[in-house]
Image (cartoon, helix red, strand yellow):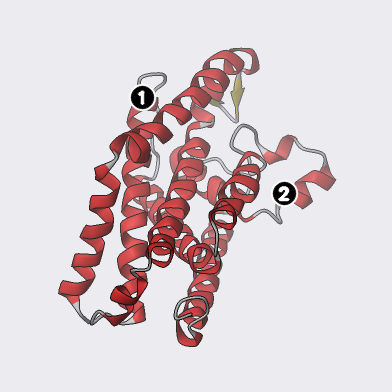
Amino acid sequence: MNIIGLKTLYLKEMSRTFRVPGQTLLSPVLTTALYFIVFGSAVGTQLGSIDGVSYAQYIVPGLIMMALLTNALSAASSGIYFPKFIGTKYELLSAPLSYLEITLGFALASASRAMIISVIIYLVSLFFTPIPIEHPLLALLFASLTAFAFSLFGLVIGIWADSFEKLSIFPVLIITPLSFLGGIFYSIDILPPLWQKLSLINPIVYMISGLRWSFFGITDINPLISFGMICIFTVACSLVLSWMFRTGYRIKS
């Protein structure tokens, strides 16, 4: 493996993140903080606790997960799309990097950016409410695996997209609605039976539930099932990316 090339690509993508910190770091943190203030402070005072956890605490893992997956996806999709858009993709393809190294370089950088934002959001949340983490290592595992999975998904979107409109379809019209319906602000146990079953179709439900369990030890879904679903999603994205690179789908043309 070309470690120097992989490291160079990773550092290049990370420098893109820190070049505009207001957009890449401050903006998602402020947005999430507003959600926390409105739902955690204003609404939470009227709702009491859920499974022994205050509402303000309860929504924190969901807000972290929403920021995690949206930023991992957007960073990866824009990172792979812009070389196509400005015509520098051939420099990347001609570099002494395998498709695996290119994928890892973009995905690890996007996941790192998402994890940094998640840590900042957690620290900001501490100003509003104490947030214990019952299983810190498992929380790190759930968060990092989800960040990596959605970084791979972002690469799929970035390769597939041939316009800025298509690039924004998934984050705006699919990921954000699924996040809100994934149990960020509520437990799916309070839903009617039919809606509980329909919620299980949403993959983000498993990711939020897994992270919430690692924080508080409470969950709507068995954490092993949540972990398995994240692994399946990661493998599926990896297989699609492998096919795209092997066939040159919207990469070499």
- Residue drawn at (40%, 32%), measured in percent from left and top? 27
Q: Is residue 238 above or below residue 37?
A: below
Q: Nearer the viewer, residue 165 or 133?
A: 165
Give the CA distance from mark 2 to mark 1: 30 Å
Indicate which disc residue 240 carries.
none
Give residue 3's quadrant in the image.
bottom left
Taking the image as shown, residue 19 lies to the left or right of residue 243, namely left
Q: Which residue is mark 2?
A: 199
* SS at badge 2: helix
Tell me what residue is drawn at x 45 percent, y 45 percent: 214
- As shown in the figure, which amino acid type bears the numbered disc 2? Ser
Looking at the picture, how far across and down is residue 239, in whole percent? 51, 78
Residue located at (58% from left, 18% from top): 44
The residue closer to the viewer here, 202 or 224, is 202
Check the picture and name the quadrant holding the N terminus: bottom left
Q: Tag 2: Cα neighbours inside 10 Å, few (<14), some, or many (≥20)?
A: some
State the image coordinates of residue 173 (x, y, percent, origin top left): 65, 47
Identify the mark nearer the N-term, 2 or 1.
Answer: 1
Q: Nearer the viewer, residue 152 or 138?
A: 152
Which quadrant would residue 129 be assigned to in this image?
A: top left
Check disc 1 and give the amino acid type.
Leu
Tell me the residue at 49%/23% (across/down): 34
Task: Kindly give the residue lying farthest to the left in the view shown.
Answer: 4
Q: Which residue is mark 1?
A: 126
